[in-house]
Image (cartoon, rainbow, N blue to C red):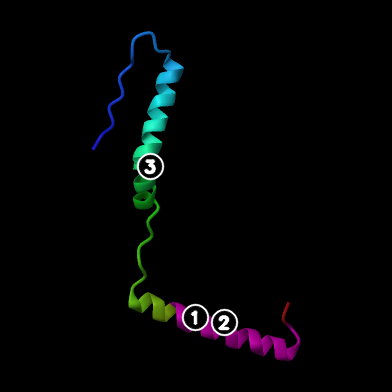
Amino acid sequence: MGIEIKKQNRETTQSLVHRFTKAIRESSILVRVRKTRFKRRKKSNQMKKRAALRREELKKEYEKLRKLGKSK
């Protein structure tokens, strides 16, 4: 699925580039490419559990320090 842009008679290079970028924008190729390029992998269930346990431990530690008056 490619876009083919050919230079027309007496067309400047600048207008050719402008037509090309407009065609790319209208075809939404960049949107699809960016979605796949920056796609994040889903976390596994084990990683989710580890992260949740870590958050709970940090909350407990923070509460402990807060009660002692040593928190930020």
Residue furthest to the right: 69
Q: In front: 36, or 60?
A: 36
Q: Which amino acid does label 3 sit on?
A: Leu
User: Residue 72, percent across and down?
Assistant: 73, 77
User: Residue 29, percent across and down?
Assistant: 34, 41
Residue furthest to the left: 1
Q: Which of marks 3 and 2 is in front?
A: 3
Number of other residues with Cα within 10 Å of mark 2, as a class: few under 14, some 14 to 19, many 20 or more: few
Residue that mark 2 sits on: 58
Magenta stretch bounds: 51-70
User: Residue 31, percent across and down?
Assistant: 39, 46
Q: Which residue is drawn at 26% across and 34% down?
A: 2
Q: In which quarter of the image is residue 42?
A: bottom left
Find out whether the residues at labels 2 and 1 contact each other: C-beta distance under 8 Å: yes
User: Residue 16, percent across and down?
Assistant: 40, 20
Label 3 vs label 1: CA separation?
38 Å
Q: In front: 70, or 63?
A: 63
Magenta segment: does it hold 62?
yes
The answer to which of marks 3 and 1 sits earlier in the sequence is 3
Residue that mark 1 sits on: 54
Label 2 vs label 1: CA separation?
6 Å
Q: In which quarter of the image is residue 59?
A: bottom right
Q: Residue at x 68, y 86 (%)?
A: 65
Residue that mark 3 sits on: 30
Q: What residue type is labelled 2?
A: Leu
Quadrant of image for the N terminus: top left
Name the element at disc 3: helix
Q: Nearer the viewer, mark 3 or mark 1?
A: 3
